[in-house]
Image (cartoon, rainbow, N blue to C red):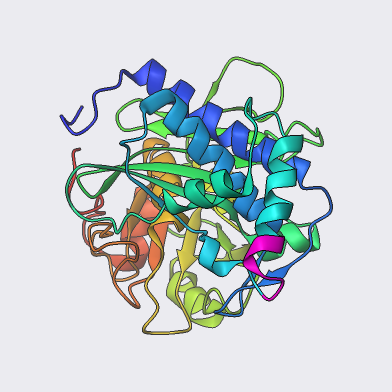
Amino acid sequence: MSEAIDIDSASLASILQEAVRAGADAVHAAGSPKAIQKSDSSPVTLADFAGQCAITESLVRRLGSAIRIAGEESADETGAAGEEETLHGVTEVLNRADTKMQWTIERVRSTLAMSRDAGGAVGSLWTIDPIDGTKGYLRGGQFAIAVGLLVDGAPFAGAIGCPRLGLSSAAADSQGTLAFAIRGRGAWQVPLKGAAAPTQMRARSWSPGGAIRLAESVEAAHSAHDRALAMISPAGSVTCLPMDSQAKYVLLARGDADCFVRLSPKPDYGEKIWDHAAGVVIAQEAGCAASDASGAPLDFRRGRSMHPGAGVFCAHPALHSAVLGGRPQRPAGGTS
């Protein structure tokens, strides 16, 4: 393990699961979701802010206040309702959740401020997306609570909680799924609620010409669907699996999908590191290859955003090679 983080694998797995479950408890405590409009016109909810605070507090409790965190939400994005009113609502949510502490507006504000790290290529950086797929969360679809760990600019560990996703494609349980991985230790899943032994996840093998199940974004504004289909379809017959959030990486890791493509309709858009850090390491540890849409290594070293317009492509190595040619890449930087 890199000298940038000195935690044994069992403890790291525990820290990841505890943080995701803390976020999930806060989201549940928020009740029926109501959207607040951010400055970029994207929605946010009280649950987003509460989830980020709960995750941050969980990480700090286990690792200390000196850790670096890059989180999606900021107190600056509290919407037209006003900062005080929104943060008051977040405080009430957190005090309903089982966070083992008393929250105040000032504590909420200072906790959100801890997640402003600019990122970079050196050291350990935790990434938090308290609700990845907020539109899915609002409409009753899939969403994910994602916590990642970058070490020297590369995904090293991550966990994704999916409250509305069963432990298999056939599962109809209400326990949800928690997937996690640590570099070199495999990818695993457990129920998000309750206790059970982890089961290992493995990507489904794929042979040239085989059928392809393509996991893609529901929202047209999130990915250029036509371009993604044109990219994949020469390799085989494609069935599209629309789904919000990093839950797509979970499907891929356990063999319920064959690839995930994200091509931004906006050429100047850089994918956010918290949208992929956890999912990439989980998929890779399950046996997948990950790169940008041209086959170049994913670069998490640039800051809070990745290279503009590069996109993301993750698939079984045989399918990855069939679509892009060449050798599948690990992310740039970091440890292997």
Q: Residue at x 63, y 65 (%)?
A: 83
Q: Quadrant of the C terminus?
A: top left
Count of marks overlaid on the render: 0
Near-viewer residue (241 or 43): 43
First to last magenta residue range: 80-85
Horizontal side of 147 relative to 93 (left or right) equals left
- 285 versus 14 height, above or below: below
Q: Residue 294's x, y, as percent?
A: 29, 71
Residue 196 against residue 228 in the figure, above or below:
above
The residue under the point 57% across, 66% down is 238
Residue at (19% x, 34% y) in the render: 4
Q: In this view of the protein, which residue sits in the foreground, 302 or 142?
A: 302
Q: Quadrant of residue 64?
A: top left
Q: Is residue 203 above or below residue 295?
A: above
- Residue 164 visible in the shown view: no
The percent position of residue 190, horizontal first and vertical second, equals: 61, 26
Residue 140 image position (x, y, % from top left): 80, 57
Q: Is residue 84 magenta?
A: yes
Q: Is residue 233 magenta?
A: no
Q: Position of residue 192 (x, y in %)?
A: 66, 30
In the figure, is residue 233 to the left or right of 317?
right
82 or 210, nearer to the observer: 82
Q: Quadrant of the N terminus?
A: top left
Residue 132: tell me if it is visible: yes
Q: Nearer the viewer, residue 239 or 201?
A: 201
